[in-house]
Amino acid sequence: MSSPKQKTYIVEHLDPDLGQWSELEYLAIAKETHAAQGTFLLSSLPTAFQVPPALSQVPAFKPERRGVEELYAADKSRVCLLDPAASRDLSPDDGDKFDVFLFGGILGDEPPRDRTSELRKKGFEGRRLGQTQMTTDTAVRVTRMVVEDKIPLEKISYLDFPELKFNDHESTEMPFRYVKGQDGKPVMPEGMIELIQKDADKSIDDLF
Ligand SMILES: C[S@@+](CC[C@H](N)C(=O)[O-])C[C@H]1O[C@@H](n2cnc3c(N)ncnc32)[C@H](O)[C@@H]1O
Protein backbone atom coordinates (compact mmCIF):
# COMPACT_ATOMS: atom_id res chain seq x y z
CA MET A 1 0.00 0.00 0.00
CA SER A 2 1.44 3.42 -0.84
CA SER A 3 1.69 6.22 1.75
CA PRO A 4 -0.77 9.13 2.05
CA LYS A 5 0.17 12.02 -0.25
CA GLN A 6 0.01 14.64 2.51
CA LYS A 7 3.16 14.33 4.55
CA THR A 8 3.84 15.01 8.20
CA TYR A 9 7.14 16.61 9.19
CA ILE A 10 8.11 16.21 12.82
CA VAL A 11 10.85 18.13 14.53
CA GLU A 12 11.53 16.55 17.93
CA HIS A 13 12.51 19.37 20.23
CA LEU A 14 15.87 18.40 21.80
CA ASP A 15 17.32 21.71 22.96
CA PRO A 16 16.36 23.02 26.42
CA ASP A 17 14.69 26.18 25.10
CA LEU A 18 13.65 27.73 21.83
CA GLY A 19 16.17 30.34 20.70
CA GLN A 20 15.49 33.02 18.08
CA TRP A 21 17.40 31.04 15.46
CA SER A 22 15.24 27.92 15.95
CA GLU A 23 12.08 30.03 16.01
CA LEU A 24 12.87 31.47 12.55
CA GLU A 25 13.71 27.99 11.23
CA TYR A 26 10.46 26.52 12.61
CA LEU A 27 8.42 29.39 11.18
CA ALA A 28 9.92 28.74 7.72
CA ILE A 29 9.16 25.00 8.05
CA ALA A 30 5.58 25.75 9.18
CA LYS A 31 4.87 28.14 6.26
CA GLU A 32 6.39 25.87 3.61
CA THR A 33 4.57 22.83 5.04
CA HIS A 34 1.30 24.80 5.01
CA ALA A 35 1.87 25.73 1.35
CA ALA A 36 2.34 22.02 0.57
CA GLN A 37 -0.83 21.11 2.55
CA GLY A 38 1.11 19.01 5.03
CA THR A 39 1.43 19.01 8.81
CA PHE A 40 4.34 20.22 10.90
CA LEU A 41 4.54 18.78 14.43
CA LEU A 42 6.96 20.22 16.95
CA SER A 43 7.07 17.34 19.43
CA SER A 44 8.38 16.66 22.92
CA LEU A 45 7.69 20.20 24.08
CA PRO A 46 8.12 20.91 27.81
CA THR A 47 4.86 21.64 29.67
CA ALA A 48 5.85 25.24 30.31
CA PHE A 49 6.63 25.84 26.62
CA GLN A 50 4.98 28.98 25.22
CA VAL A 51 4.28 28.72 21.51
CA PRO A 52 5.51 31.90 19.80
CA PRO A 53 2.45 33.77 18.38
CA ALA A 54 3.81 33.85 14.80
CA LEU A 55 4.07 30.04 14.79
CA SER A 56 0.65 29.40 16.30
CA GLN A 57 -0.92 31.43 13.48
CA VAL A 58 0.24 29.00 10.78
CA PRO A 59 -2.52 26.37 10.31
CA ALA A 60 -0.07 23.53 9.46
CA PHE A 61 1.72 23.95 12.80
CA LYS A 62 0.82 21.63 15.70
CA PRO A 63 2.63 21.89 19.05
CA GLU A 64 2.83 18.51 20.78
CA ARG A 65 3.83 17.58 24.34
CA ARG A 66 4.27 13.89 23.52
CA GLY A 67 7.45 12.58 21.95
CA VAL A 68 7.56 10.83 18.57
CA GLU A 69 8.06 7.42 20.20
CA GLU A 70 4.75 7.74 22.01
CA LEU A 71 2.97 9.25 19.00
CA TYR A 72 3.98 6.47 16.60
CA ALA A 73 4.48 3.53 19.04
CA ALA A 74 2.19 1.27 17.02
CA ASP A 75 3.23 2.62 13.65
CA LYS A 76 7.02 2.94 13.58
CA SER A 77 7.33 1.78 9.98
CA ARG A 78 5.58 4.96 8.73
CA VAL A 79 8.34 7.15 10.17
CA CYS A 80 11.65 7.95 8.46
CA LEU A 81 14.38 9.56 10.56
CA LEU A 82 16.59 11.97 8.64
CA ASP A 83 19.94 10.97 9.98
CA PRO A 84 23.37 12.24 8.85
CA ALA A 85 24.82 8.85 9.90
CA ALA A 86 22.32 6.65 8.00
CA SER A 87 23.77 4.22 5.47
CA ARG A 88 21.20 4.98 2.72
CA ASP A 89 20.43 8.32 1.09
CA LEU A 90 16.81 9.49 0.83
CA SER A 91 15.23 8.73 -2.58
CA PRO A 92 11.95 9.78 -4.27
CA ASP A 93 10.60 6.23 -3.69
CA ASP A 94 10.78 6.85 0.06
CA GLY A 95 7.79 9.14 -0.44
CA ASP A 96 5.76 5.98 -1.21
CA LYS A 97 7.17 4.09 1.74
CA PHE A 98 6.90 6.71 4.51
CA ASP A 99 4.45 9.50 5.28
CA VAL A 100 6.15 10.87 8.39
CA PHE A 101 9.63 12.43 8.33
CA LEU A 102 11.46 13.03 11.58
CA PHE A 103 14.24 15.55 12.26
CA GLY A 104 16.31 16.50 15.29
CA GLY A 105 15.35 19.90 16.71
CA ILE A 106 18.97 20.80 17.25
CA LEU A 107 20.99 23.77 16.11
CA GLY A 108 23.77 22.89 13.72
CA ASP A 109 27.20 22.69 15.26
CA GLU A 110 30.72 22.49 13.89
CA PRO A 111 32.12 19.89 14.22
CA PRO A 112 28.76 18.05 14.38
CA ARG A 113 28.17 16.42 17.78
CA ASP A 114 25.81 13.73 16.43
CA ARG A 115 22.92 14.63 18.69
CA THR A 116 20.64 12.99 16.10
CA SER A 117 21.81 9.79 17.87
CA GLU A 118 19.18 10.56 20.58
CA LEU A 119 16.51 9.83 17.95
CA ARG A 120 18.43 6.98 16.28
CA LYS A 121 18.15 4.98 19.53
CA LYS A 122 14.35 4.95 19.17
CA GLY A 123 14.58 2.51 16.26
CA PHE A 124 13.09 4.42 13.30
CA GLU A 125 14.44 3.64 9.84
CA GLY A 126 17.03 6.25 8.82
CA ARG A 127 17.92 8.03 5.59
CA ARG A 128 20.74 10.47 4.88
CA LEU A 129 20.60 13.68 2.85
CA GLY A 130 24.20 13.40 1.65
CA GLN A 131 27.32 13.88 3.71
CA THR A 132 27.12 17.60 4.45
CA GLN A 133 25.35 19.01 7.52
CA MET A 134 22.23 21.07 6.72
CA THR A 135 20.27 23.41 8.95
CA THR A 136 17.02 21.84 10.16
CA ASP A 137 14.83 23.94 7.83
CA THR A 138 17.10 23.05 4.88
CA ALA A 139 16.86 19.36 5.79
CA VAL A 140 13.02 19.58 5.79
CA ARG A 141 13.04 21.59 2.50
CA VAL A 142 15.29 19.06 0.77
CA THR A 143 13.26 16.11 2.11
CA ARG A 144 10.08 17.66 0.71
CA MET A 145 11.75 18.23 -2.69
CA VAL A 146 12.81 14.57 -2.78
CA VAL A 147 9.68 12.80 -1.46
CA GLU A 148 6.95 15.17 -2.71
CA ASP A 149 8.43 16.78 -5.82
CA LYS A 150 10.34 13.55 -6.64
CA ILE A 151 13.62 15.34 -7.37
CA PRO A 152 16.57 13.02 -6.72
CA LEU A 153 18.91 14.32 -4.01
CA GLU A 154 21.83 14.75 -6.42
CA LYS A 155 19.73 16.85 -8.87
CA ILE A 156 19.04 19.59 -6.31
CA SER A 157 21.24 22.71 -6.57
CA TYR A 158 23.02 23.43 -3.31
CA LEU A 159 25.31 26.07 -1.87
CA ASP A 160 27.87 24.68 0.56
CA PHE A 161 29.37 26.91 3.26
CA PRO A 162 28.17 30.18 1.69
CA GLU A 163 29.75 33.44 2.71
CA LEU A 164 27.22 36.06 3.83
CA LYS A 165 28.52 39.53 3.09
CA PHE A 166 26.93 42.24 5.25
CA ASN A 167 29.01 45.18 3.97
CA ASP A 168 32.53 45.91 2.67
CA HIS A 169 34.12 44.92 5.97
CA GLU A 170 31.83 42.31 7.50
CA SER A 171 31.09 38.81 6.29
CA THR A 172 30.61 35.38 7.81
CA GLU A 173 30.87 31.85 6.44
CA MET A 174 27.99 29.52 7.30
CA PRO A 175 29.25 25.96 7.97
CA PHE A 176 26.20 24.28 6.40
CA ARG A 177 24.69 23.18 3.09
CA TYR A 178 21.72 25.22 1.78
CA VAL A 179 19.41 24.95 -1.23
CA LYS A 180 20.39 27.43 -3.94
CA GLY A 181 17.49 29.81 -4.61
CA GLN A 182 16.35 31.23 -7.98
CA ASP A 183 18.38 34.35 -7.17
CA GLY A 184 21.56 32.27 -6.73
CA LYS A 185 21.55 32.92 -2.96
CA PRO A 186 21.13 30.34 -0.16
CA VAL A 187 17.46 29.79 0.78
CA MET A 188 17.16 30.90 4.41
CA PRO A 189 14.27 31.69 6.77
CA GLU A 190 12.95 35.24 6.69
CA GLY A 191 14.89 37.44 9.12
CA MET A 192 17.80 34.98 9.47
CA ILE A 193 20.45 37.12 7.76
CA GLU A 194 19.59 40.05 10.04
CA LEU A 195 19.77 37.76 13.10
CA ILE A 196 23.15 36.35 12.02
CA GLN A 197 24.50 39.86 11.51
CA LYS A 198 23.18 40.95 14.92
CA ASP A 199 24.81 37.91 16.57
CA ALA A 200 28.10 38.61 14.74
CA ASP A 201 28.05 42.27 15.88
CA LYS A 202 27.30 41.12 19.43
CA SER A 203 30.30 38.74 19.50
CA ILE A 204 32.53 41.57 18.27
CA ASP A 205 31.12 43.88 21.00
CA ASP A 206 31.73 41.14 23.59
CA LEU A 207 35.44 41.27 22.73
CA PHE A 208 35.70 44.82 24.06
C1 LIG B 1 21.29 21.05 12.20
S1 LIG B 1 21.06 19.34 12.00
C2 LIG B 1 21.91 18.77 13.43
C3 LIG B 1 23.05 17.93 13.09
C4 LIG B 1 23.85 17.88 14.36
N1 LIG B 1 25.15 18.40 14.21
C5 LIG B 1 23.78 16.59 15.11
O1 LIG B 1 24.25 16.68 16.23
O2 LIG B 1 23.23 15.58 14.68
C6 LIG B 1 19.37 19.12 12.52
C7 LIG B 1 18.67 17.94 11.91
O3 LIG B 1 18.62 18.07 10.48
C8 LIG B 1 18.69 16.78 9.85
N2 LIG B 1 19.89 16.77 8.97
C9 LIG B 1 20.77 17.79 8.75
N3 LIG B 1 21.69 17.43 7.84
C10 LIG B 1 21.40 16.16 7.45
C11 LIG B 1 21.98 15.22 6.53
N4 LIG B 1 23.05 15.53 5.82
N5 LIG B 1 21.38 14.00 6.40
C12 LIG B 1 20.29 13.68 7.14
N6 LIG B 1 19.70 14.52 8.02
C13 LIG B 1 20.23 15.73 8.17
C14 LIG B 1 18.77 15.75 10.98
O4 LIG B 1 17.47 15.26 11.27
C15 LIG B 1 19.33 16.57 12.15
O5 LIG B 1 18.96 16.03 13.41
Image: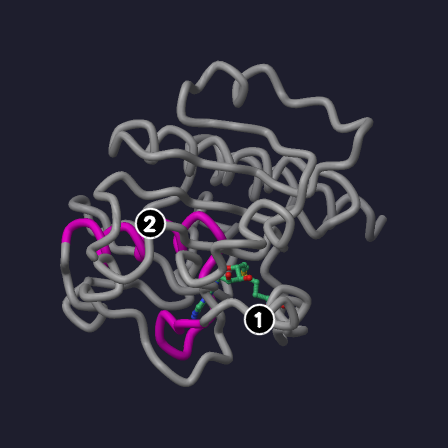
User: 41 or 170: which is nearer to us?
Assistant: 41
Q: Residues within 10 Å of mark 1 (few under 14, many from 20)?
A: few
21, above or below 103, in the image: above
Tell us which disc is closer to us: 1 or 2.
1
Residue 132 % position (x, y): 42, 74
Residue at the image point whose x is 30% and y is 56% from the top: 142
Queried whether the magenta region covers residue 147, the answer comes back as yes
User: 97 or 186: which is nearer to us?
Assistant: 97
Residue 191 % position (x, y): 48, 31
Give the mark, 1 or 2, whose residue is nearer the N terminus. 1
Queried whether the magenta region covers residue 53, the answer comes back as no
Residue 140 % position (x, y): 39, 51
Residue at the image point whose x is 49% and y is 60% from the top: 76
Residue 107: image quadrant is bottom right
Q: Amino acid at mark 2?
A: Arg
Q: Residue furthest right?
A: 208
Q: Residues within 10 Å of mark 2 (few under 14, many from 20)?
A: some
Alpha carbon distance from label 1 to label 2: 24 Å
User: 37 or 145: which is nearer to us?
Assistant: 37
Quarter in which the N terminus is drawn: bottom left
Residue 123, numbered label: 1
User: Element at badge 1?
Assistant: loop
Q: Amino acid at mark 1?
A: Gly
Q: Which residues are magenta?
A: 126-149
Left or right: residue 85 versus residue 119 is left
Which residue bears the numbered disc 2?
A: 141
User: Element at badge 2?
Assistant: helix
Residue at the image point whose x is 41% and y is 54% from the top: 101
Q: Are marks 1 and 2 in contact (CB under 8 Å)?
A: no
